[in-house]
Amino acid sequence: MSKQTPAEQSIVVAVTGASGSAYALRLIQRLSQAGVKQHILLSDAARVVFKQEVDLVLPMETDGTAQALAQHLNIAADLLHCYSLNDWFSPTASGSAGIKKMVVVPCSMGTLARIACGASDNLIERAADVMLKERRQLILVPRETPLSSIHLENMLKLSQLGAHIIPAMPGFYHKPQSLDDIINFLVDRILDHLDLSNPEAKKWGS
Ligand SMILES: Cc1cc2nc3c(=O)[nH]c(=O)nc-3n(C[C@H](O)[C@H](O)[C@H](O)COP(=O)(O)O)c2cc1C
């Protein structure tokens, strides 16, 4: 049986400028706690939203970004690998590196549209294009309201290409008591799809 390489066991986490940066932070924290190596890609707009929504100011340098995220989340930085969006030599830029999974959380309508048309104009779009062309796992967490026909058509197209669309739409049937519960609801669903289910997550019917 073939053994997975470190790249195959790692996950690309891309963060774009949609509302919901808390989801990205919680996912990065949970993956780190599970010992998963992460390739982190941040759009410029994601940095603006981090500052606006969670008062987190991230430096533009990629090394400093990993440190700042680790410090904010109280996790070790060694599993976080950040790349600039024109680092075409990053392992996320080619199918031959063997990375099997990618999550875009939150996913802006702009990035969603550019992935849907195969623009590959920055490393987030290219990494997503790699996942689609290699028939690997691409999870998109779109956030916008209301949704236009353009947004819906792009999501339908990507779903038909095999991407998992997990919209930032928390359910309320578990009676969330806090913002944390609402964030965890969505992040637990993402982890389920990554085959990294949280055993403590409330399950329907349990
Ligand atoms: C605070 C803030 C919240 C935003 N929320 C959303 C959103 O929920 N969905 C969305 O598609 N765009 C949202 N935007 C606009 C995107 O950031 C903008 O379209 C940007 O160009 C997206 O770039 P990116 O896809 O490279 O991250 C928001 C912008 C800001 C500053």
Image (cartoon, helix red, strand yellow):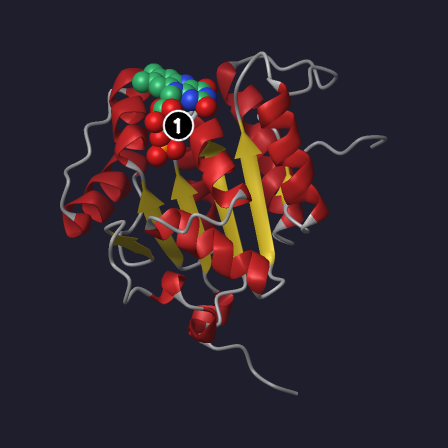
* Amino acid carrying mark 1 in the image: Ser
Name the foreground residue: 188 vs 82: 82
Quarter of the view holding residue 184:
top right
Query: In this figure, what is the number of numbered marks?
Result: 1
* Residue at the (60%, 17%) spot, across then down: 147
Q: Residue at x 61, y 29 (%)?
A: 167
Quadrant in which ligand 1 is drawn:
top left
Q: Residue 160: x percent and y percent?
A: 72, 46
The answer to whether 89 appears left or right of 137 in the picture is left
Q: Position of residue 206 (x, y in %)?
A: 83, 32
**In the figure, is residue 75 to the left or right of 173?**
left
Work out whether 60 lies above or below 152. Answer: below
Say which residue label 1 marks: 21
Above-or-below relation of 143 to 116 = above
> Which secondary structure lies at badge 1?
helix
Please tell me whether residue 93 is drawn above or below residue 86 in the rendered image.
below
Residue at 47% of width from left, 32% of height from top?
106
Residue 199 position within the rendered picture, expressed as x and y whole percent measured from the top left = 66, 44
Residue 169 appears in the rendering: no
Q: Is residue 8 above or below residue 139?
A: below
Pointer 1 local density, CA inside 10 Å: few below 14, some 14–19, many at least 20:
many
